[in-house]
Amino acid sequence: MVNIPNRLLKESFVEVLFHDTKITVLQKTLQQNIENRQSYVARHAISFVLQGKQRIETPDGNFTSVSAGQIAFFKRGIYTVSDLLSENAVFSSFHIFLEDRLLQKIFQQHRIRVLGVGKPIFTIPSSTYILHYIQSFQALSECLAVLSPEVVTAKIEELFAFLLAKDVAGTFSLALEKWQQKESNNLRTLMENHFDKAFSIEDYAYLTGRSVATFRREFKLKFGTSPRKWITQQRMEKAQELLQQNSWKVHQVANQVGYENASYFIQEYKKMYGYTPASGTKKQGLAIKS
């Protein structure tokens, strides 16, 4: 599964304006469609579609279409994303990814209340100001050798201040009040569907709408073991099935069961079964290469 924004940092069609552990700002320009890419958006995101269209599907099958001239607000989570070209064969978008703490600070500054659970995505129309705002980000990156976190934070706070000042009808603030809440999802269903993703325990806790402590406690009650042990068991069983049924390389199987590091996968597999993935398949006469 693609981890956003980390995966985007490596793409040739992406210009990274700023990146640290808390905030990422980047611009994407495509000359071909990228369709149905399942992604884990690891931070809350604001997506400005400048040309083309973006289609986002949530795990429960709901679609959101974001056209040129719209802004989409994403809660951190799992989505299937398609970037579709415009009539002149271009897709371009501007993205801000931010962590919980900055979002909470902005909400406190503007007295955004807590009103329950809303949709994980909502959209609002753009404006002339938004285009100038994006251009100002680009101008800053050209004028300053290195953008500082303080400058970038101030720019993000500026965006929210403008959108809330313009929000005479109160629709944007209402969407924010609902958007910031985490829905408590079915723990068993989410784990059984996503144990093979490259997620941390913290990621799983967030996706189920629980604190890490609550997640661990409820997990032990439902599954009778710790999250780490259960996830490892499920991944190893799936890996063994894949190795028996497919002529894949070991690193490909590792990726399929949630391990980005093939060496670590091999260690875990040997710890579980007493032999490496490659040697185990050779015993069965299967052509697997490590």
Image (cartoon, helix red, strand yellow):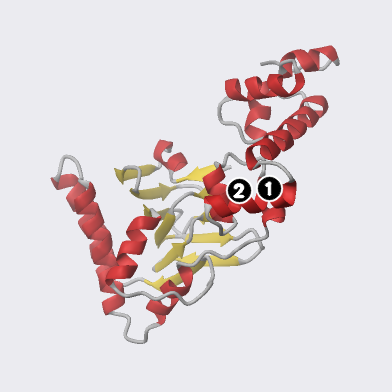
**Residue 79 shows up from this direction:** no
The residue drawn where x is 66% and y is 41% is: 226
Q: Residue at x 46, y 40 (%)?
A: 7
Q: Which mark is residue 216?
A: 2
Q: Is residue 24 left or right of residue 199?
A: left
Is residue 125 shown left or right of residue 211?
Answer: left
38 in relation to 179, above or below: above
Residue 122 percent location from the top left of the image: 48, 70
Locate residue 180 relative to residue 200 in the image: left or right: left
Q: Position of residue 261 (x, y in %)?
A: 56, 26
Q: Residue at label 1?
A: 220
Task: Name the one closer to the observer, 261 or 101.
Answer: 101
Mark 2, secondary structure of its residue = helix
Contact between marks 2 and 1 (CB within 8 A): the answer is yes
Res 13 quadrant in image:
top left
Residue occupying image coordinates x 68% and y 60%: 186
Q: Is residue 103 left or right of residue 62?
A: left
Quadrant of the drawing holding the C terminus: top right
The amino acid sitting under disc 1 is Lys
Q: Label 2 to label 1, Cα distance in Å?
A: 6 Å
Q: Which amino acid, mark 2? A: Arg
Q: Quadrant of the N terminus?
A: top right
